[in-house]
Image (cartoon, rainbow, N blue to C red):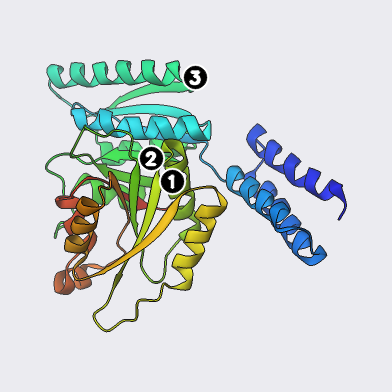
Amino acid sequence: MDNSILKTAGAAQLDAHSGISCEYADKTIYWCCILISLKGDTQSGLIRLRLRYSAAMSYRKIIIVIDEHTASTIIARYAISLAAACKAELVLYAGHVEGCSEVLILRTERHLEHLSMIASALNIPVTRTVEAGNLSTMLPKRVQAEHADLVFYPMAPGERYGAALQKHTVHTLLRTVQADLAIMRAITMARPHPGRILVPLGKVISDKERRLIFVADLAKSFHSHVTLFHLFEKHETTAMSDDILWFQEQLRLQNVTVMERSGRGTLKKALTVEAITRRNDLIVLGASGRGILRRLFSGNPAGDVMHQPPCNIILFRPAL
């Protein structure tokens, strides 16, 4: 096979980092993979191109929502580590409601200053943005203005994902933020660097490419082990689905240590047992696509886990 094909793939990746559309890089590397498979070249060459494909798809700009709660600074540490690993720009964002207490504003500003210093020390390009108004309205506009591709949002203590009336800020953001959205609840500050990440997956994984990018980048930024967890139905066989096997293989191609586990019963109970017995530090859930009627009759398992998680937890919803 002509070495110029490999050079073209590498150039496409570099051009993508220089500002040229990633779509060009993706298509070029994709067709190079096809050519390699047709030419019968070694598996290692194909793996190298797949890794380059993954690098071209990493995050470029990450927005972190910061508020007066200490938990938001813990969540920000996850985003900062991810930005450092992806060589992404960082935007520390705070939105105050009109007439907010000066004490709360001052506390938030201190958090912004502290996190800005941490990011700068890691040579991460970082900016701070503070706006006054309704966060549900301001944040989606800010995401578009910044051309961000990932947003970290810390759930407030009183917020509940999957609440019956769906009136919390988190529900509005799920419907309006165009970028990938990581909604996080931090319940402990003891382990800000997760060594073990638990990833529940269904038999069919929706938006599996976007979820793969997020999980892989997160795991690599912390050098974490990943456990793919599947909950089997009562009479279901214990064979892993093609989607889960694909997810596992793609993580391994990116040198992420991965294992598989399974369980039965309710999602909340199974995840709680798995997280505690295997000492997982972080759970990464996929956002539920259940409609209102389905939630009323069969509940919202992801919402139950997010409300009282056994460890720190992220609800990931891919870009709209």
The residue at 75%/55% (across/down) is: 32
For the residue labelled by badge 2, is the local secondary structure a helix, a strand or a loop?
strand
Q: Amino acid at mark 3?
A: Asn
Circle 3 residue: 123
Depth check: give the residue in front, 215 or 44.
Answer: 44
Contact, mark 1 vs mark 2 (Cβ under 8 Å): yes
Amino acid type of the residue tagged 2 in the rendering? Val
Does residue 316 lie above or below 101 as drawn?
below
Q: Which residue occupies the foreground of this view, 157 or 174?
A: 157
Q: Secondary structure at mark 1?
A: loop
The first of marks 1 and 3 along the sequence is 3
Amino acid under label 1? Ala
| Classed neighbour count for the residue bearing mark 1: other residues with Cα under 10 Å, few (<14), some (14–19), many (≥20) | many
Vertical position of residue 40 compared to residue 57: above or below: below
Asked if one can make out residue 87 in the rendered structure from this viewpoint, the answer is: yes
Say whether disc 3 or disc 2 marks the residue closer to the N-terminus.
3
Residue to which mark 1 is pinned? 179
- Secondary structure beneath label 3: loop
Which mark, by number, is residue 151?
2
Mark 1–mark 3 distance (CA, rounded to whole Å): 24 Å
Residue at figure coordinates x 19%, y 19% from the top left: 107
**Residue 255 vs residue 247, the one in the foreground:** 255
Quarter of the image containing the N terminus? Answer: bottom right
